[in-house]
Image (tube, helix red, strand yellow):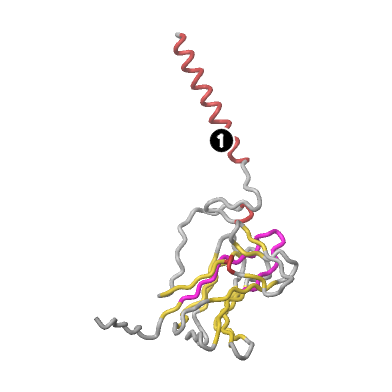
Amino acid sequence: MTRANVVKWAALAAVGVVCVLVLAWLPGMAVGQGDRPAGGVPGGQVAALVTPVPVPGGPNFYSVSAMGFKPLEQDTGWGYYADSWLTNPGPDEATYVAALALPHGATVTKFVVFFYDNGLALDVQASLLKCSYWDGYCTRMAEVASSGTDTGSRAVEDSTIVDPVVDNQSNWYVAQVLLPPAPLGYEFALEAIRVDYGYGAALPIVMDGR
């Protein structure tokens, strides 16, 4: 065997050893709790890469992310998982609210809540509320709740809207979410809410007189 052949086979053997070491190392890699890789889910559980399917609705949309919610009570704590999902770090269920600037005269067609729920027994609950300027109380226009457990993001919706026409002259509007406690930081989380709306009749065309 020539010296050149010896060098070639030695190089091939070295490459083979490196490949074996890499293949042996990959299964030992772990995703730590709190990491959220692309296509993954909280807690280090890796899900299949899928293209999310938009929740149908509309024709117009008004949305508020979890970052727009705040605790209803002063002594209620809050936290954010992955810098965007609202979680409840306290020992008890807690209520969080976000004011909504819905367009006057629009007809609400659907209330959609995007959430994460991988906890047993308790559920994420949310309501769309209409509140009177004069009477100091609010009434429910729509209400949803999660069900069961899942290691991925989900959405739940309510299209049976009570008194759906927005009247900003007499009312203001708010989204309210009840989050169970999440001692590990991610068992229950709010991602966002969406209010779908349309108009009962075509809007008039404004003429400028020219």
Q: Is residue 198 above or below residue 188?
A: below
Query: Residue 144: where, in percent of width, then height?
Result: 57, 76
Quadrant of the image occupied by residue 119:
bottom right
Badge 1 marks a residue whose secondary structure is: helix
Q: Which residues are magenta?
A: 177-196
Q: Is residue 61 in the magenta section?
A: no
Query: Residue 189: where, in percent of width, then height?
Result: 62, 65
Q: Is residue 84 left or right of residue 203?
A: right
Residue furthest to the left in view is: 210
Q: Of residues 81 and 115, which is closer to you in this image?
A: 81
Residue furthest to the bottom in view is: 135
Q: Of residues 10 and 133, which is closer to you in this image?
A: 133
Q: Measuring 75% from the left and 67% from the top, which residue is drawn there?
A: 91
Q: Measuring 56% from the left and 60% from the top, which residue is drawn there?
A: 152
Q: Is residue 48 left or right of residue 29?
A: left
For label 1, the residue is: 23
Q: Is residue 178 in the magenta section?
A: yes
Main SS of residues in magenta: strand
Q: Of residues 103 and 46, which is closer to you in this image?
A: 103
Q: How many marks?
A: 1
Residue furthest to the front in view is: 210
Q: Is residue 165 above or below residue 184?
A: below
Under mark 1, the amino acid is Leu
- Neighbor class of circle 1 (other Cα within 10 Å; few <14, some 14-19, many 20+) is few
Query: Residue 123: where, in percent of width, then height?
Result: 64, 71
